[in-house]
Image (cartoon, helix red, strand yellow):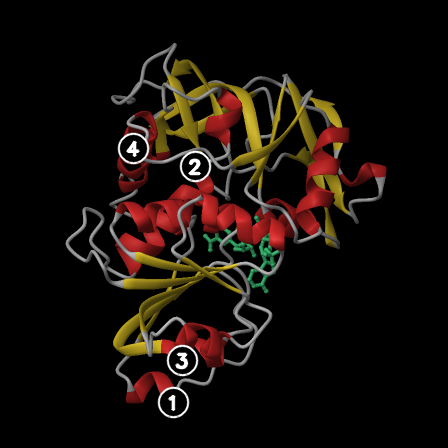
């Protein structure tokens, strides 16, 4: 089967950083599905895993953590899917990735693909939807179905992949959304996705939120970087919650959090599959929920660029774009 892989961890401008390879087609056991992949999306995690470091992979390593495709066959213990079903999923970072013509994935982290979307439109969604959904509803404890409506949330990094679906999920839950964007293009994009207010994460965030007439916000989501930590501590309401999906290597003074009884949560969307938690199936459930909301017209895909065909050249192009840190929405590759 066709795949894009690497043996050495190299800068993306090196043609060997990702190359085309032919690998044996796997077969499913246990709760695994064998999926014929039709489209994949590229995320910052791909570039972090692939980026320059020591080590040699033999056989070549296949990464990629977002796909839409069709179930080809199922393992003997599969109960949720059958051959022919259209599915979308992010997968498991400890296993071979989505950048191949066929892939094995545990059914408990797979959802039925939204029926109203093409494979390219669907492939843009799983990793970022799981991240934003778990951050808001599982970690911060916001009510998905509107019991917390009118509460406010500050989404730092509104225009990226996670922010683009996060804004929509937060609006669906009835929240007042302040999203950050630093360019005209990204500012327009987050408004189009439903943000009530847009502020610039490269300027004084406390002053900008206060200028909106808000002393504090109820929730804060760090969906890109953590360099506004001090502003977040200042802005979070007493007993409010902050969630981060990103960097852990910046200073994060906690004194202001203690005196507000504020809480900090971490979200890592691979945690459930990586640790085989008993509630792993919640990712199947949440992807099913997102697909229903898409098909009902309440959420939209976040794809902004589609590259074709699926090959190493286009994969390197997508990685370089992600590494630029300026992507709006999601980049997808199709055409297997
Ligand atoms: N823990 C997890 O499970 C998990 C899951 C998904 C992603 N992540 C991590 O979360 C980060 C974001 O992922 P993503 O897919 O949304 O990234 P992305 O799509 O590459 O984000 C690009 C966008 O981020 C904005 N941005 C750049 N630097 C920023 C900063 N310092 N503060 C706020 N916004 C900034 C830019 O908007 P402007 O041009 O408007 O500045 C740009 O359009 C990555 O580091 C990724 O690895 C973690």
Q: Which residue is mark 4?
A: 293
Q: Position of residue 315 (x, y in %)?
A: 70, 33
Q: Is residue 323 left or right of residue 236?
A: right
Q: Mark 3 vs mark 4: which is more N-terminal? A: 3
Q: Is residue 54 visible to us here?
A: yes
Q: Nearer the viewer, residue 48 or 301?
A: 301
The secondary element bearing badge 2 is classed as helix
Residue 289 placement: quadrant? top left
Q: Mark 3 vs mark 2: which is more N-terminal? A: 2
Looking at the image, do the residues carrying marks 2 and 4 touch, with CB atoms under 8 Å apart?
no
Quick one: label 1, few (<14), some, or many (20+) residues within 10 Å? few
Quick one: label 3, few (<14), some, or many (20+) residues within 10 Å? many
Q: Which residue is mark 3?
A: 233
Residue 221 placement: quadrant? bottom left
Instruction: Tell me how far mark 2 sits from mark 1, CA to CA.
Output: 36 Å
Instruction: Tell me how far mark 2 sits from mark 4, CA to CA.
Output: 13 Å
Count how many numbered circles sit on residues in the image. 4
| Relative to 133, residue 210 above or below | below
Q: Position of residue 140 (x, y in %)?
A: 28, 62
| Relative to 167, residue 78 above or below | above
Quick one: label 4, few (<14), some, or many (20+) residues within 10 Å? some
Q: Which residue is mark 1?
A: 255
Q: Nearer the viewer, residue 276 or 115?
A: 115
Q: Is residue 47 left or right of residue 112?
A: right
Quick one: label 2, few (<14), some, or many (20+) residues within 10 Å? many
| Relative to 163, residue 86 above or below | above
The secondary element bearing badge 4 is classed as helix
Looking at the image, do the residues carrying marks 2 and 1 touch, with CB atoms under 8 Å apart?
no
The image quadrant where one finds the C terminus is top right
Q: Which residue is mark 2?
A: 126
């Amino acid at each position: 089967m066709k795949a894009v892989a690497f043996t050495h961890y190299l800068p993306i401008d090196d043609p060997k950083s990702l190359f085309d390879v032919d690998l044996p087609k796997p077969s499913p056991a246990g709760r695994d599905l064998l999926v014929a992949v039709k489209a994949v999306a590229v995320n910052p995690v791909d570039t972090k895993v692939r980026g320059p470091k020591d080590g040699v992979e033999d056989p070549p390593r296949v990464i990629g953590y977002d796909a839409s495709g069709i179930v080809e066959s199922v393992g003997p213990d599969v109960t949720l899917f059958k051959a022919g079903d259209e599915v979308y999923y992010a997968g498991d970072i400890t296993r071979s990735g989505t950048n191949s013509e066929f892939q094995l994935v545990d059914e408990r982290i797979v959802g039925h693909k939204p029926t109203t979307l093409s494979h390219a439109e669907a492939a843009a969604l799983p990793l970022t939807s799981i991240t934003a959904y778990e951050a808001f509803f599982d970690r911060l404890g916001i009510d998905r179905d509107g019991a917390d409506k009118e509460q406010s949330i500050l989404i730092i990094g509104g225009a990226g992949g996670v922010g683009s679906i996060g804004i929509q999920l937060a609006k669906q839950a009835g929240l007042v959304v302040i999203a950050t964007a630093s360019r005209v293009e990204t500012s327009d994009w987050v408004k189009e996705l439903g943000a009530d207010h847009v502020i610039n994460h490269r300027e004084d965030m406390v002053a900008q939120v206060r200028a909106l007439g808000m002393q504090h916000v109820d929730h804060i989501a760090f969906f890109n970087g953590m360099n506004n930590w001090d502003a977040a501590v200042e802005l979070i309401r007493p007993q409010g919650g902050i969630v981060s999906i990103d960097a852990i290597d910046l200073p994060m003074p906690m004194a202001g959090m203690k005196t507000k009884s504020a809480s900090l949560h971490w979200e890592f969307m691979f945690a459930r599959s990586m640790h085989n938690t008993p509630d792993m199936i919640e990712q199947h459930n949440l992807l099913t929920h997102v697909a229903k909301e898409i098909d009902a017209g309440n959420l939209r895909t976040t794809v902004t660029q589609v590259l074709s065909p699926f090959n190493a050249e286009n994969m390197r192009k997508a990685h370089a774009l992600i590494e630029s840190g300026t992507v709006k929405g999601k980049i997808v590759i199709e055409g297997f």
